[in-house]
Amino acid sequence: MPLWWLSLVGQKKTNMRISYNWLKQFINIEESPEELGKILTDAGLEVEAIEKHESVKGGLENVIIAQVITCVPHPNADKLRLTTVDTGNGVVLPVVCGAPNVAAGQKVILAKVGAILYPVGQTEPLKISKAKIRGEVSEGMLCAEDELGLGQSHDGILVLDTDLPIGTPAAAYFNLTTDYVFEIGLTPNRADAASHLGVARDLKALLKKPICLPELDHFKAGDNKNLVKISVENSIACPRYTGLVIKNVVVKDSPEWLKTKLLAIGVNPINNVVDVTNYVLHELGQPLHAFDLQKIEGNQIIIKNAKDGDKFITLDGTERTLKGTDLIISNTTEPMCLAGVMGGKTSGVSTLTTNIFLESAYFSPETVRKSAQNHGLKTDSSFRFERGTDPNMPLFALKRAALLILELAGGEIASEVQDVYPHKIKDFEYEVSCGRIRRLLGIKVSDDEISTILQDLGIKINNKEQDILQLSVPPFKVDVQREADIAEEILRIVGLSKVELNPYLGANYLADFPEKDKDKLTALLANVLADNGYNEIITNSITKPAYAEKIKSLDVSQNVDILNKLSEDLAVMRQTMLFSGLEAILYNVNRKQKDLKFFEFGKTYHKTGDKYLEKNHLVLFAIGNTTNESWIEKPAPIEFHDLMKMVQMVIQKIKIKDVKLEPISDEVWIEGLAIVKNNKELGRIGKVQNALLKFADLKHAVYYADLDIDLLIKQSETKLQYEEISKFPEVRRDLSLVIDKKVTFAEIEEIAKKAEKQLLKSTNIFDVYEGDKLEAGKKSYSVSFTFQPTEKTLTDEEVDKIMQKLIQSYESITGAVIRK
């Protein structure tokens, strides 16, 4: 596979819904939805899912037209009737019915045994089964409108006036449709495929079949008596603007076929005029907008840039402050539309509207993108304009929408078509070499095949000399502006699956996968902490500048400032995760939650000169008691060693060995330990300084661990090592040492490791004493040593020899006195 093609794999996709039935209006499709999905995926329009869409949920399967043969009162229930129902082919079924209007001779709707209905207003489906009702067998249900999911009426069963034969599926009687919707992951370079027509263009080349565009033969423009004056003040942001007036429309609900089309692709119907504009948008890829003609003050449309600070209420009811970069559609007194993004609250079409001005335009992608980002709006319209629409489509789409509005809302076209297009956007013209295209693709494709594919895609070949093609690429193919883009177009139609990989190509050629998966390791640690009663928190990375000022080791000049800060409390990115954790603790303490154990994976942010640095952390917080109140055991306050136990568990879980613990006392921790391996600090743990707790408005002791997660992962061991269990018994010996208070257990453990490297398995303190029976400045450690031989059973003499060596080391290095 050529390397240029691999770059497309990482493009961010946007999901787009395309209807199978809708595509059939453009092109004759014989392939099943599944087959068509594979074809589209192979052409670069990745079908991520195919969803079955029914105009009535369940599609009324196992529901038929039947005829009531007999109808008599139920012997055991006054309000029920016993009926026999002819289902066709000589099959007659007994059915108990409670509807007051059931009678012999009626044609009705029968849900047979096994049918699943979705009644209106019920959350659970209704499955029809054979049953005994008051002692009488019933094999089905005669249905009312709401029971079928067709409407709200429950006055009685549906009685049909039809010549359709008994046994006809109810879906055929009600003209129900079943559609299949393709969920397509649309990459940014495929703006041309953001509509049913766009997908149909690809299918034209893939299936070698013509496409059929909507007929406009019946379109007839009005005169110039009802023209709305159009003034384009910024023709760069709006190169083309078309519009016309339609009068005497009746705004009402859309017909079922239109509602079904829109609902299938996830668009909610509103009214017939608005639904037509949405329909044409998804059909042709051209956004349109309908204005209430009465709301166009001065009978004038002005396309211009807004003034900084102008207020405008959009269709969603939000008042927005406009910027000078925003392009607006205005009348003579006020804005009516944020161009290409969203219409205004007051100028849109309502049930009171009788006359409309219909707009179809081409706006520059840069202009619409800025406005959408400025106001945090993402609409179907802005989605297409931002990526680039077809400048040749506005007029065609305008006429198409106008004809549909006449069909669904009545009225007449009352003006000429106005098309303000001062500088026509030309095709992209350049030459390509068929030979170079073949080298780019790495596959065999003839000159004739290349020419045919390009022409099927709507690309004109103006001239050909040898293998050089002079092309005119229509502007709807926004991203096809060079030879490599032409190669991509050809490859899509030939099929990505046609690109053969070298049989000797290894997976490591395509990607070098890391030996240590950070996501898996962090997930592993999160599970360990959660299993031990710790709750994960996610705190805000944006914080107060004052926090960095409270810790002298943090350089305020390294703060990463927020340019558009919402407040002084959210002005910088954090340099430490301590304060955001203390805020979370305070929030819970204020709500009577006092026994807390938190952990968080997060980042700190630092600026050094003109460079920025992000550091990944795992932090742990503990406050209150180790357990909740219980009659089984009394709660004990959390101490340093409770948090240390969890940190050791984290270190052991990712198989880090031989860490050293070094005592610390600084402006963050009153007393604590630094965790070190290979002279690199993996993290720190201890009790938070009282001054910091007071600053955070906390009155309880907080234990805090801050671990460098990147360094932890780097030092972790991913490979498991197995050792045979020793056949020989381990041996334990104890020593009682009187030592200076400044001597730590870490030093005791390190001395033991150096004195006996082979047999020593573990060192442990099981008792500590400090009191008036010892000299001032002294403490007593009771230490156990466990020895594990692998080759033979240790004799007492051998163990005594090792212990003597340990005693000599402690006496000489720490000045310890051995208590005997």
Image: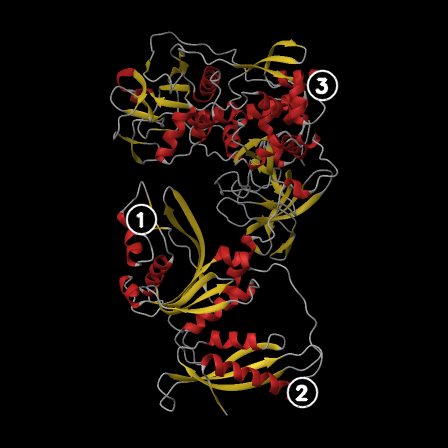
Residue in the image at 42% along x and 47% along y: 613
| Mark 3 lies on residue | 446
- Quadrant placement of the N terminus: top right
Figure quadrant of residue 729: bottom right
Residues under numbered marks 3 and 1 in contact, where contact means CB atoms less than 8 Å apart: no
CA–CA distance between discs 3 and 2?
86 Å
Give neighbour class at mark 3: few <14, some 14-19, many 20+ (Cα, 10 Å).
Answer: few
The x, y position of residue 383, in whole percent, is 45, 30
Q: Nearer the viewer, residue 493 or 563?
A: 563
| Mark 1 lies on residue | 557
CA–CA distance between discs 3 and 1?
63 Å
The x, y position of residue 482, in whole percent, is 56, 20
Residues under numbered marks 3 and 2 in contact, where contact means CB atoms less than 8 Å apart: no
Look at the picture and state if 198 lies above or below 610: above
| Mark 2 lies on residue | 795
Give neighbour class at mark 1: few <14, some 14-19, many 20+ (Cα, 10 Å).
Answer: few
**Left or right of residue 139, residue 688 in this image:** left
The x, y position of residue 18, in whole percent, is 56, 31
Q: In terms of secondary structure, where does tag 2 sit?
A: loop
Residue in the image at 53% along x and 84% along y: 807
Q: In terms of secondary structure, where does tag 1 sit?
A: helix
Nearest-to-viewer mark from 3 and 2: 2
Look at the picture and state if 543 lies above or below 225: below
Q: In terms of secondary structure, where does tag 3 sit?
A: loop
CA–CA distance between discs 2 and 1?
64 Å
Q: Nearer the viewer, residue 223 or 408?
A: 223
**Left or right of residue 639, residue 459 in this image:** right
Q: Earlier in the sequence, mark 3 or mark 2?
A: 3
Q: Of the residues shown, which amino acid type is indicated by label 1?
A: Ser
Residue furthest to the right in view is 503
Residue 432 visible, this angle:
yes
Nearest-to-viewer mark from 2 and 1: 2
